[in-house]
Image (cartoon, rainbow, N blue to C red):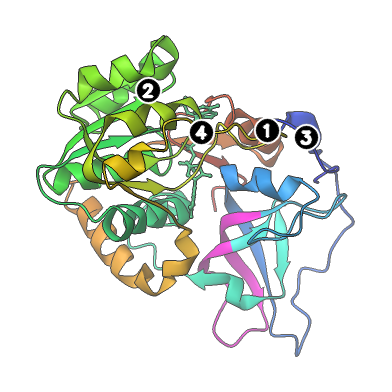
Amino acid sequence: IFKGYIQGTPKETDMELRVGKKMKMEAPKGSGSFLVKNLYLSCDPYMRGRMRDFHGSYIPPFLPGSVIEGFGVSKVINSDNPNLKPGDIVSGFTGWEEYTLIHKPEQLRKVEPDNMPLSYFIGLLGMPGFTAYVGFYEVCAPKKNEYVFVSAASGAVGQLVGQLAKLHGCYVVGSAGSSQKVDLLKHKLGFDEAFNYKEEPDLDAALKRYFPQGIDIYFENVGGSMLEAVLVNMRIHGRIAVCGMVSQQGMSDEKGIKNLFNLISKRVRMQGFLQHDYLHLFPSFLEKVGGLYKEGKITYLEDINEGLESGPSAFAGLFSGKNIGKQVICVAHE
Ligand code: NDP
């Protein structure tokens, strides 16, 4: 349950576990709804935005005192919907609870697991993977041999961006917040180089070390001082895909960004994007990324916490970098 609107960084105590009333395990006749058992729930940084009393965003705020909504992978238990039957696996918006009655069928889609781990449908083959795919191919407009930098590189989105960039023939460097993550980037995810931004007193100097010739593409996930340092290291006609700014989320007073004049002098294109504007590309994404995974050309790191009760701490952990890879909550194995 989301307790109430927050300021600053989310804490475990902003949410609470409640035992609900007994529910009828049946979708009401004639409603078109269906009942699901939630298997995997997704912790995503954008959910922080739904915890403030602000109605001007692309997604409405959570209702205090109600069940948290988020992406999940669920199994249909009972259905009054002609397109779904018990046993089907669906992915999309569901509740942070054991069972959810889905009134808006369009919020979820049926998935064909095809021997993939079910949790991948909220990670590699779900919203974060799709964000990496459209952000990289559509917004970054990459070319072979370009120099690519990814921040929050070991996370749900960043790890796939880096791997797609490598497959595209780019030179890829990632930043992350621990030596364990840096090690994974270099030795498991195939990045050419990686560094721990927390151990770099001077981010500009760090970027100059890894990109003596400059950066063609910056996949922006964090904002703040990292963006300021990147701006002075961009190459002429570079592109910055602004996917997220996790360091700025929850700050009551967003920090002004220095070095923006570089956008002009280097003719850099900096473009924000939201994955849901590209949903027409979802089928080609599934085919391409699912295919790459099956061919063994990409890998995907997940951080799976067991039990619905682990949800609040797992979600809060996104903002201190506790997660190693895509943060998932396993509510039930099937
Ligand atoms: P991650 O799995 O990367 O988890 C968040 C990570 O952010 C943490 O693990 C941590 O990694 C890093 N982080 C947290 N606080 C800070 C900070 N103050 N400064 C720098 N890094 C920090 O999340 P996702 O991959 O799911 O999301 C990455 C970004 O993409 C987010 O900004 C998110 O909002 C955005 N996004 C945008 C979408 C769109 O359509 N535009 C869709 C989906 C996501 P570390 O240990 O490395 O610091």
| Residue where numbered disc 3 is placed | 7
Question: Is residue 27 shown above or below 14?
Answer: below
Q: Amino acid at mark 2?
A: Lys
Q: Amino acid at mark 1?
A: Met
Mark 4: is the Cβ under 8 angstroms from ligand 1? Answer: no
- Residue 61 found in image quarter: bottom right
Q: Which of pointers 2 and 3 lies earlier in the amino acid sequence?
A: 3
Work out whether 232 lies above or below 50. above
Residue 67 in the image: above or below residue 158: below
Q: Is the CB–ligand 1 distance for label 2 below 8 Å?
A: yes
Could you tell me the amino acid type at mark 4? Answer: Ile
- In the displayed structure, does residue 35 sit left or right of residue 239? right
Q: Which residue is mark 4?
A: 257
Question: Which mark's residue is nearer the viewer, 2 or 4?
Answer: 4
Q: Which residue is mark 1?
A: 251
Q: Is mark 3 within 8 Å of ligand 1?
A: no
- The residue mark sitting in front, 3 or 1, is 1
Q: Earlier in the sequence, mark 2 or mark 4?
A: 2
x%, y% of residue 217? 26, 42
Image position, residue 273 (x, y; %): 45, 57
